[in-house]
Image (cartoon, coloured by chain):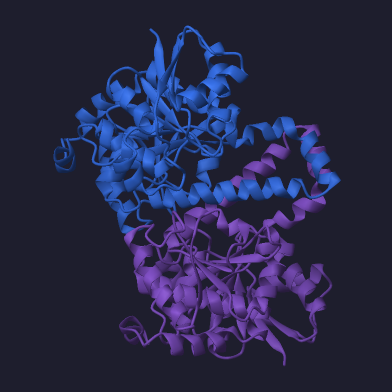
Chain colours: A blue, B purple
Amino acid sequence: MTITISIDCMGGDHGPSVTIPAALSFLKKHDDVHLILVGLDATLRAELKKHRAESHPRLTLKNATEVVEMDDPLEIALRKKKDSSMRVAVELVKDGRANASVSAGNTGALMAISRYVLKTMAGVDRPAICSIMPNQKNGPTYMLDLGANVDCEPHHLHQFAIMGSVLCSAMEHIPRPTIGLLNVGTEDIKGNDLVKATGELLRADHERGQLNFHGNVEGNDIFKGTVDVVVCDGFVGNVTLKAVEGLSRFVKSVFKESIFSMAGALLARKSLKKLNPERYNGAGLLGLKGLVFKSHGGANAYAFEWALQRAYDAAKYDVLEQLSALIAELMPTSPGEERQA
Amino acid sequence: MTITISIDCMGGDHGPSVTIPAALSFLKKHDDVHLILVGLDATLRAELKKHRAESHPRLTLKNATEVVEMDDPLEIALRKKKDSSMRVAVELVKDGRANASVSAGNTGALMAISRYVLKTMAGVDRPAICSIMPNQKNGPTYMLDLGANVDCEPHHLHQFAIMGSVLCSAMEHIPRPTIGLLNVGTEDIKGNDLVKATGELLRADHERGQLNFHGNVEGNDIFKGTVDVVVCDGFVGNVTLKAVEGLSRFVKSVFKESIFSMAGALLARKSLKKLNPERYNGAGLLGLKGLVFKSHGGANAYAFEWALQRAYDAAKYDVLEQLSALIAELMPTSPGEERQA
């Protein structure tokens, strides 16, 4: 089976100068992949020419006349720029011409366009953003929601747990991933009203043998690798993710302070590699009727290729099918979904 | 003026083997300090003997027959162990015999005992925990609340902002510290209901010239040093703090992986020093009618000494007076406070 991925080549801080080299490198590594490059035709052709890759049997160009800028308000992205590379790339998924789409553009715009174009999956009230972080057990920790939903109810977090579990299971080949609820302590009685009520829902699922709920976890458990999937609301997830990114940048800057610390970083580079955030690029927008992955806006070609890899894996391992099957089993169709469908 | 600090010598993972050497070292550095060591008399004397410091003109021993264990439930700590070293140390502040108290014991127990013994300051609904983090501008970022209040209303966050501003101003000698509201984006319209409503209160204060509100900040701004004080609810603060601690431990463990990375860390040690969390030990319990500081439970003597230093500074720079003055100016006496007083 060929896996077709549509790429919003104009998105991100660097646009085609990053997305196209990444696409070409990815194409070389996978002979079962077909890529659709979406963007301003002349710009794409010029970049391809630089790499002497004007034509390739598994590469298609798709013209899109507009670009969603990183600071475009949602309305502009959604209502005005109807021929943006971001939107056209997602529409290719909707039309069944691509199995997944990848963009490094504005996260809010990508989520809004994806919800509008693809619609939400039956049984899901709100899509969520799921990414991975490295952990001390040398595995990734899946974490969601990372910012799509800043005000959540317990049933939203419950759905995030289901979605994260399916994504992790399919991508990592773990039959029953362990799920942790991000909290201020591990005891069941700990936490704010939201997580206490969510804990009850997850424990009930666990007792029925449906989800592998480990219990509450704390912030440090993300990096310990205590569980496979960490669930939280989008406010907490976004703040935590950015704080962690901020600390990483701080550590990096400290190593650049003197010739000694630079030499130290050089000596330790093999070990430090596992902390490299580029290796963990590519967040899934889960709960939509189609696969969309978001690359970090500042990603370089190496990092963008990792986002392509995740989209490829998600399509190959049938995340969408597995997700709708488990959602149908565990979630009665919710009123929210009916309104949207 | 002599500053008297009462020390819960039995608290923390290591008890007197850490607290007493730290106390003795601190005593040497400050000739205007008097320390009251609280704990099991025989245990304290034995530890002092080890250091050949059985008597010192600025050292007093205060016997307490019980110890709050790290895993004691709140009720046990508060209702049953009425002669615990933690409680006796806080009571010395209440009785005016100490200017501040320091404990490395169970955070929940320390907060509960401090609230019970000292009571909440007029105008404050809920005390908060405020700590500092290193930032890229070589200054500390003050952050609160770090876990005392997991369900907050806008007026609670508003009070946290006032308290954090006063602490930072007094300790760092900054006349009008900048305050940032931790959020998922910097624009005013961003965030969940709680922070949007809090932002309105803080903007109003800023317009009246009362608080130096910078606006919303994101997780990475904690380490960038964008503002002097970062305000959030205790759930977000606790999760973020622990995630950051977890990442730090992960980075440390990576440096221990091979002889090369260990050599690298050694080379970079001078630069890495500024990231050392021990240097930032000592969180203030703010909003009480007395000064209480919390050391990390696992602190070594060097780190515990830093917690003593913060308690000393807070007493010396009259944080309590300044706090009640600003609270009285900005906060009408709240119903919550009246119930408690």
The residue that appears at 45% across and 64% down in the rendered structure is B232
Q: Residue A123: x percent and y percent?
A: 20, 35
Task: Depth check: give the residue in front, B280 or A96.
Answer: A96
Above or below, A35 relative to A180: above
Q: Is residue B151 visible from the viewing direction of this image?
A: no
Above or below, B260 relative to A69: above
Task: Depth check: give the residue in front, B201 or A139.
Answer: B201
**Residue B292, quarter of picture:** bottom right
Q: Is residue B103 visible from the viewing direction of this image?
A: yes
Please give left or right for residue A21 compared with residue B276 in the image: left
Q: Residue A3: x percent and y percent?
A: 40, 14
Q: Residue B131: x percent and y percent?
A: 58, 66
Extreme residue toward the front, this view: A42
Q: Residue A240: x percent and y percent?
A: 49, 50
The image quadrant where one finds the N terminus of chain B is bottom right
The image quadrant where one finds the C terminus of chain B is bottom left
The residue that appears at 46% across and 78% down in the rendered structure is B206
**Residue B222, quarter of picture:** bottom right
Please give left or right for residue B137 compared with residue A41 in the image: right
Please give left or right for residue A282 compared with residue A210 in the image: right
